[in-house]
């Protein structure tokens, strides 16, 4: 199945075989896209939503001076722009980080799911609410944590989300971002990002080098980041029990 990672580690168990088949049947095509490629621009009219099969995708906004703020990073199993089904236009740009494999779901297919598959529709809605929960946590991170804790929180979240979809093994995971992009996600300067990575390495918590993160002491990293994974709703299938 193409959508095998959708809600894995969360509410995947709530999907029936029929619903998994419906979701896969809604996919109109699969394609590979190279790194640093724009998928959609702010204010583009969207006619389809995108499901990430492999790789990493970022959402970001630029200020008038061209300075970028990463506002989200998507991992395999995520619908990147499902909220575009309702909004039609997004207020941010979407681009690949490294090479990706994506599937597209036309909005008319989503309309049919909403009308004919209410339980599956609820699960799709849940996935957009997960995005909102992560956005709130990113706001907390930027507003209340110092630079080192922000970077620690960023890596705790990515490790947790990738573990949910089976891509975090032996305390290591691939993440094709530069230190500049890490700074943009954490609201710090590039120099500060470099300094915080050095602090985390010297304290024996994390090494990030050449696109690979190695978590050396996850409990310590979580304590520093004040990280609580409850906002990611792990193992939440019970929320979707059928009446």
Image (spheres, helix red, strand yellow):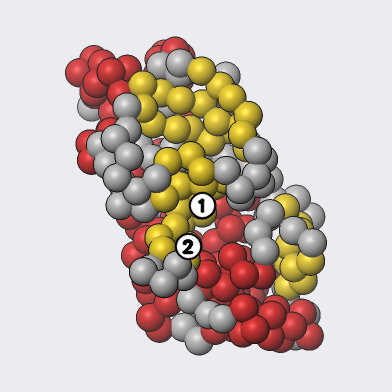
The numbered mark, 2 or 1, whose residue comes first in the sequence reads: 1
Q: Secondary structure at mark 1?
A: strand
Q: Quadrant of residue 22?
A: top left
From the image, tell me which residue sits under label 1. Answer: 58
The relative height of residue 25 versus residue 146 in the rendered view (above or below) is: above
Left or right of 29, for residue 231: left
Question: Answer yes or no: do the residues labelled 2 and 1 have beta carbons within 8 Å?
Answer: yes
Closer-to-camera residue (39/129):
39
Residue sitting at x 36%, y 27%: 48
Q: Could you tell whether 173 is left or right of 117 in the image?
A: right
The x, y position of residue 91, in whole percent, is 30, 52
Residue 186 at x, y percent in the picture: 51, 73
Callout 1 crowding tier (Cα within 10 Å): few <14, some 14–19, many ≥20: many
* Residue 193 visible somewhere in the drawing: yes
* Quarter that holds the C terminus: top left
Q: Residues within 10 Å of mark 2 (few under 14, many from 20)?
A: many
The residue at the point 41 percent across, 72 percent down is: 65
Please state which of residues 91 and 114 is positioned toward the viewer in this rendering.
91
Residue hosting label 2: 70
Q: CA distance from mark 2 to mark 1?
A: 7 Å
Q: Is residue 238 left or right of residue 54?
A: left
Residue 49 drawn above or below residue 182? above
Q: Position of residue 5 (x, y in %)?
A: 55, 34
Q: Is residue 16 or residue 37 the one in the foreground?
A: 37
Q: Position of residue 181 (x, y in %)?
A: 59, 65
Check disc 2 and report its element: helix, strand or loop: strand
Residue at figure coordinates x 62%, y 70% from the top left: 180
**Quadrant of res 173:** bottom right
């Amino acid at each position: 199945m193409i959508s095998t990672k959708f809600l894995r580690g969360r509410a995947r168990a709530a999907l029936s075989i029929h619903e998994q088949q419906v979701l896969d049947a809604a996919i109109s095509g699969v394609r590979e896209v190279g790194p640093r490629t724009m998928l959609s621009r702010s204010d583009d009219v969207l006619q389809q939503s995108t499901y990430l099969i492999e790789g990493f995708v970022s959402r970001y906004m630029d200020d008038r001076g061209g300075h970028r703020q990463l506002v989200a990073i998507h991992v395999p199993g995520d619908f990147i722009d499902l909220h575009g089904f309702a909004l039609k236009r997004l207020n941010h740009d979407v681009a690949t980080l490294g090479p990706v494999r994506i599937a597209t779901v036309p909005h008319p297919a989503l309309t049919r799911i909403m009308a004919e598959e209410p339980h599956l529709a609820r699960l799709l809605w849940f996935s957009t609410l997960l995005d909102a929960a992560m956005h709130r946590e990113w706001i907390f991170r930027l507003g209340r944590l110092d630079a080192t804790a922000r970077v620690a929180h960023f890596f705790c979240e990515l490790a947790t989300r990738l573990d949910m979809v089976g891509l975090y093994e032996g305390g290591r995971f691939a993440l094709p971002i530069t230190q500049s992009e890490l700074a943009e996600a954490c609201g710090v300067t590039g120099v500060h990002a470099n300094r915080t990575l050095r602090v985390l390495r010297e304290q024996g918590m994390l090494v990030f080098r050449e696109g690979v993160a190695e978590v050396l002491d996850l409990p310590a990293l979580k304590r520093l980041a004040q990280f609580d994974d409850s906002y990611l709703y792990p193992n939440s299938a019970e929320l979707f029990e059928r009446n």
